[in-house]
């Protein structure tokens, strides 16, 4: 999904099978996060995340920061908007 006048950026917390990720995703304006993932982005295999901070679920892991990552949606355990 491209960034445009009809999208908004939201900060999210993403839990995958191996990582905890915080970052920003773009969703259509006026659409809930769950609706965006289940309807608008249902055919996309990956979720584009910008300004990402990635930490392994291992306790001794050091977080890594990246400007852009793609997260395989099949590996998602949970996703939540951040304040």
Image (cartoon, grey):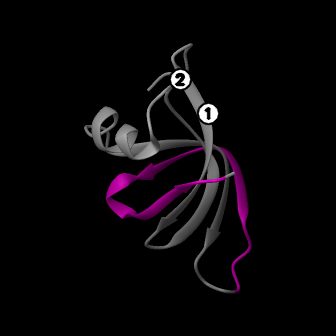
Q: Residue furthest left?
A: 43
* Badge 2 element: strand
Residue corresponding to mark 2 = 7
Determine which quarter of the picture holds residue 51.
top right
Q: Are marks 1 and 2 in contact (CB under 8 Å)?
A: yes
Percent x, y of residue 73: 36, 53
> Where is residue 53, by image quadrant?
bottom right
- Magenta-highlighted residues: 60-82
Q: Position of residue 76 (x, y in %)?
A: 40, 62
Magenta stretch encompasses residue 2 = no
Q: In percent of the image, x 61 and y 40: which residue is there?
A: 10
Few, some or many C-alpha atoms within 10 Å of disc 1 (few <14, some 14-19, many ≥20)?
some
Position of 76 relative to 69 (above/below): below
> Relative to 2, does residue 24 appear above or below in the rendering?
below
Residue 9: numbered disc: 1
- Residue 62 sits inside the magenta stretch: yes
What secondary structure characterizes most of the magenta part? strand
Q: CA distance from mark 1 to mark 2?
A: 7 Å
């Amino acid at each position: 999904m491209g960034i445009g006048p009809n999208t908004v950026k939201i900060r999210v917390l993403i839990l995958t099978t191996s990582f905890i990720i915080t970052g920003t995703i773009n969703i259509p304006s006026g659409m809930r996060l769950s609706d965006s993932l289940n309807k608008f982005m249902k055919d996309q295999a990956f979720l584009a995340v910008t300004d990402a901070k990635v930490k392994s679920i291992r306790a001794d892991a050091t977080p890594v920061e990246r400007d852009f990552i793609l997260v395989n949606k099949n590996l998602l355990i949970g996703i939540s908007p951040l304040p």
